[in-house]
Amino acid sequence: MKRLGLIFSILTVFVFSTAFFQEKEYTVAELRELYSGDAAKWPKPDLDQEAKKGFKDIGYLGRPTYPANNPFKEEKEKLGRILFFDPRLSASKQIACASCHDPELGWGDGKRVAYGHDRQNGKRNAMTIINTAFYSKFFWDGRANSLEHQSGFPVADHVEMNMDLAGMVKNISQIEGYKPLFTAAFGSDEINLDKIQKSIATFERSVVSTNSRFDSFVKGNKAALKDEEVVGLHHFRTKARCINCH
């Protein structure tokens, strides 16, 4: 039995190695042409079965889109930014969304685990909000399906901002200066949870990464990346299998 097991192991390694080394080898020129062209013609990524679920390949993101029930409006984005940085959304009136999503730290918190109300430690660190406009699931466990939906969780969480949502709406309604902002954003000075969530979500959708050399390259500028970077891009998606986690 041991001999059979050993033979099976050797055959498995041989088959895997053969498949690995028989993968088509591209010249740098071919890779440059492929990856700066139609993404549908890129070499297939090397993915684990689990990673294939809902997989989205890397590439140029384009411009954010806004849901039909929350279209973009400049005044709404402005209101959302003010709310995002306002600590009065929390029970202690000391913790804002921006306390954990700090623009000076890449819109994250730079910590191993986040801390919140009464300096309690959370379970995880705060994810960056950069490019969340392009996400379909939110939080580390994917429990929210939109930025609007997501925005209420941290406020109500006892470890984070520790504020019941109705109380938060009441507090914001009593702050002088907010009603004109809601009127400009929504055409009415009524302040409610739906408007607060839509405003914050609209602001968060505006926080997107700027165009990089990678963006320029995949949009067709063949000279934007160096040879080793082009090869690295290919290996990232294929042999090195980095794309399974990133």
Image (spheres, grey):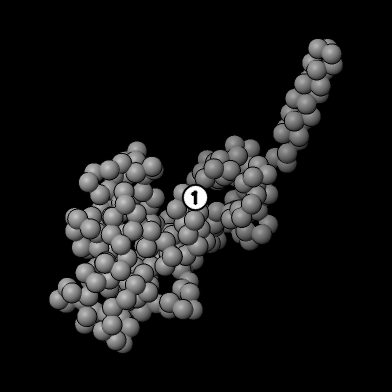
Q: Residue 218's spot in the image, x, y percent?
A: 54, 57
Residue at the extreme top of the image, as rendered: 2
Name the foreground residue: 124 vs 244. Answer: 124
Residue 129 percent across, percent down from the top left: 38, 57
Q: Which residue is mark 1?
A: 141
Out of 99 and 154, give the one closest to the viewer: 154
Residue furthest to the bottom:
187
Q: Residue at coordinates 49% horizontally, 50% vertically from top-left?
A: 141
Residue sitting at x 28%, y 55%:
161
**Relative to residue 128, is residue 66 depicted above or below?**
below
Q: Position of residue 228 (x, y in %)?
A: 52, 40
Q: Is residue 77 above or below residue 246?
A: below
User: Callout 1: helix, strand or loop?
Assistant: loop
66 vs 210, nearest the viewer: 66
* 68 relative position to 55: left or right: left
- Give residue 22's quadrant in the image: top right
The answer, for residue 161, to whether it is visible in the render is yes
Who's the residue at 47% across and 65% down the image? Answer: 146
**10 Å crowding of disc 1: few (<14), some (14-19), many (20+):** few
Q: Position of residue 237 (x, y in %)?
A: 60, 45
- Of the residues shown, which amino acid type is indicated by label 1? Asp
One can see residue 203 in this view: no
Query: Where on the picture, by quarter, is residue 124?
Result: top left
Q: Quadrant of the N terminus?
A: top right
